[in-house]
């Protein structure tokens, strides 16, 4: 599905949509975080495209293959569709500069913190990066957002520690404990800007 609005929320996967158990590659290991479905529906209803951007170093490490990753991604689409949610696209980077598997060993522009996945999405989906937002659970998500020139970078971390927020490098525009809180902030911020 191609958004017609030219804007999207870029979503990290692990720690944003699902609990980060480390190298999640099978549906039975994928645990949706509380409030995710409601948050995604609210963003979609407000006219935001939904684009997942995820590093998948487990492929380069030989922990799972492209077929397992594709199967999990198809399952994710199916689960979301049952809740009336359609992702516009899912982009992933399987590369590592020191990958044990030579086929995936390379320096690329798509592995976050590089902005390649976001720029590719912008080209493919006709997005205006300056109108987009990234929501991620890792510093590399925020770095990729800054490098791509998105409008706002939101960091999910639990617990939310004010001292850690103040010292965060790179700084996020907003830090919260869940995608539900991130969506609420984004929708309120959007209303404030348009008022």
Image (cartoon, rainbow, N blue to C red):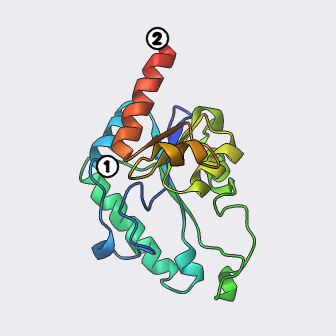
Q: Is residue 14 above or below residue 178?
A: below
Kindly identify which residue carries mark 1.
36
The answer for how far apart the CA atoms under marks 2 and 1 are is: 27 Å
The residue lying toward the viewer, choosing from 191 and 78, is 191
Disc marking residue 25:
none
Q: Residue placed at 28% from the left, 59% from the top?
A: 79
User: Which residue of the protein is positioned furthest toward the left in this rendering?
Assistant: 82
Residue 34, x across and y down, in percent? 27, 52
Which residue occupies 40% across, 25% down? 188
Q: Is residue 43 visible?
A: no
Q: Nearer the viewer, residue 167 or 19?
A: 167
Task: List x then y, in percent, for residue 116.
Answer: 68, 56
Side of 78 relative to 117 (left or right): left
Q: Residue at x 65, y 74 (%)?
A: 95
Residue on which the image places disc 2: 195
Q: Are marks 2 and 1 in contact (CB under 8 Å)?
A: no
Determine the residue positioned at 51% across, 40% down.
8
Q: What is the secondary structure assignment of the residue under circle 2?
A: loop
- Is residue 95 visible in the rendered image? The answer is yes
- Res 191 → quadrant: top left
Can you say whether 101 is above or below 28 in the image? below
Secondary structure at badge 1 equals: helix
């Amino acid at each position: 599905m191609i958004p017609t609005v030219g804007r999207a929320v870029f979503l990290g996967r692990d720690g944003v949509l699902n609990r980060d158990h480390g190298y999640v590659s099978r549906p039975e290991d994928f645990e949706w975080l509380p409030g995710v479905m409601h948050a995604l529906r609210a963003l979609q209803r407000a006219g935001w495209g939904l684009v997942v951007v995820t590093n998948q170093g487990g492929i380069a490490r030989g922990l799972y293959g492209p077929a397992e990753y594709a199967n999990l991604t198809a399952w994710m689409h199916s689960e979301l569709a049952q809740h009336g949610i359609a992702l516009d696209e899912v982009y992933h980077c399987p590369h590592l500069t020191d990958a044990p598997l030579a086929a995936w060993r390379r320096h690329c522009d798509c592995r976050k913190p590089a902005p390649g996945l976001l720029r590719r999405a912008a080209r493919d989906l006709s997005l205006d990066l300056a109108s987009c937002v990234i929501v991620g659970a890792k510093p590399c998500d925020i770095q990729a957002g800054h490098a791509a020139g998105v409008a706002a970078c939101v960091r999910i971390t639990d617990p939310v520690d004010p001292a850690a927020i103040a010292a965060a490098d790179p700084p996020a525009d907003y830090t919260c404990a869940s995608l539900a809180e991130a969506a609420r902030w984004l929708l309120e911020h959007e209303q404030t800007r348009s008022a």
